[in-house]
Amino acid sequence: MARVCWPYFDPEYENMSNRINPPRVSVDNVTCQNSTLIKVDSMNKPGILLEVVQILTDLDFIITKAYISSDGGWFMDVFHVTDQQGNKITDTRTIDYIEKVLGPKGGAKEQVTPWPGKRVGVHSIGDHTAIELIGRDRPGLLSEISAILANLHFNVAAAEVWTHNRRIACVLYVNDDTTSRAVDDPTRLSVMEEQLKNILRGCEEDDDGGVGRTSFSMGFTHTDRRLHQMLFADRDYEGSEKADCAPAPTLKPQITIESCQEKGYSVVSVCCKDRAKLLFDIVCTLTDMQYVVFHATISSDGPNASQEYYIRHMDGCILDTEGEKERVIKCLEAAIRRRISEGVSLELCAKDRVGLLSEVTRVLRENGLSVTRAGVSTIGEQAMNVFYVRDASGNPVDTKTVEALRKEIGHRMLLNVKKTPGAGTGGGGGSGGGAKDQQGNKGWAKTSFFFGNLFDKFLA
């Protein structure tokens, strides 16, 4: 067994080293004709790769290539990025933000405030209580959850919902419908928790899996990473998808793990259809499984993505048993599939009001639709929601159902319907998906929520 220990970092030494050798960040629009190069050099520390990728992903950048090296005491990354339209990053405010958050002052995250109009992660939501839910999925469950919150006078300011292998994970940000402040009353929270547990417990009656769970938090969390952690802890990677929901052989990720004995690494190769945030999802999962990425190369070729990682476990060991390799492959496959949504996406925009989410999900349920993934956002007084839906049997939604929805809710809110025929949305080595995604590539669907165009139409 090859064993190379991860170096110990004394906290005081690390702080001193950062002061002597602060991180260096450069944004280069000259070297490459088609993309902006973001170069990051800094002292190495556990988790630094995920921090950088998370920031770039939250800015909705498309990463077409990346070269990563963090062996030893220094971390060096080069990312080739564009915006969602495939253009270079030229906005001075965006460049200033990148240099600030990835530079010497980036460690003091509480001092970094997203600029007006640009939401980074969930840090612009304001006072809220974060609710985490996980359990067995079934049609209409999201409608029941939102109805409970509305009845208890909680307003949903934002939410993200993922389903995978018949499991559902939600992170919802709620506040009091009168004060718009976070709810810290133990009695109210206890009542809400008990009612939510009851409906999740009901979902588990015919299931061999664990009982649905709820938890509460008054602080901020990175929603996407938390959803990965929740489903990973729930062992969704061990489940088996229904035959009609399983990926086609051409869409199934090709993941291999080999040993590089002379260098003491395990080499993880991932080839699959490219799609939004793919790089983040893979790095997040490797990090949460306590694997360290020492070197990596990332590239996208048309609709396809190719990624190679040289890794060790945090204890310095490589993957030297078939059981370990199989577990990592399953976990990476699950991480890739969690964000995939095929079928029809419904984009809705309306003036925000208490109970809006409950009303919309009720209408979807009454029309026989099951939500496979959802993103709920509130910007000012406008609520902007995206729902990926299939029928109750997991099949694509037919035209008659879509037209019935238009008639029922089209006069109260702006409704935009998009088909997402399992198409690869390319363009991003995993961190974006953009203009080139919309040219008809077939494969997985774009899975990042962008409300700009819809919002402009609503205000017109």
Image (cartoon, rainbow, N blue to C red):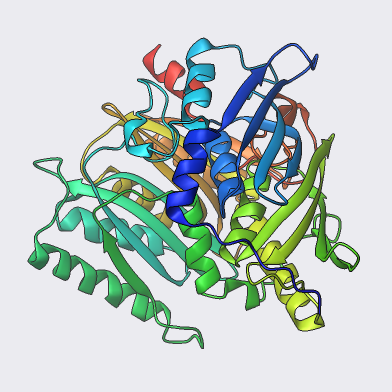
Residue 104, position as x, y percentages in the image: 48, 31
Which residue lies at the image location 53% right of the left edge and 37% below the top edge?
A: 55
Residue 113, position as x, y percentages in the image: 34, 28
Q: Measured along the vertical axis of the image, is residue 427 above or below residue 87?
A: below
Q: Measured along the vertical axis of the image, is residue 342 above or below residue 114?
A: below
Left or right, 247 with reference to 353: right
Residue 118 seen from this side: yes
Q: Nearer the viewer, residue 17 or 199?
A: 17
Q: Measured along the vertical axis of the image, is residue 311 above or below residue 317?
A: above
Which residue lies at the image location 45% right of the left edge and 63% below the top edge?
A: 169
Left or right, 425 with reference to 172: right
Q: Nearer the viewer, residue 450 or 343?
A: 450
Residue 367 seen from this side: no
Left or right, 346 with reference to 141: right
Tag count: 0
Check the picture and name the quadrant holding the N terminus: bottom right
Check the picture and name the quadrant holding the C terminus: top left
Q: Measured along the vertical axis of the image, is residue 207 above or below residue 132?
A: below
Residue 24 location, quadrant: top right
Residue 23 location, quadrant: top right
Residue 74, position as x, y percentages in the image: 66, 44
Q: Nearer the viewer, residue 91 or 235?
A: 91
Residue 140 location, quadrant: bottom left
Residue 329, position as x, y percentages in the image: 75, 68
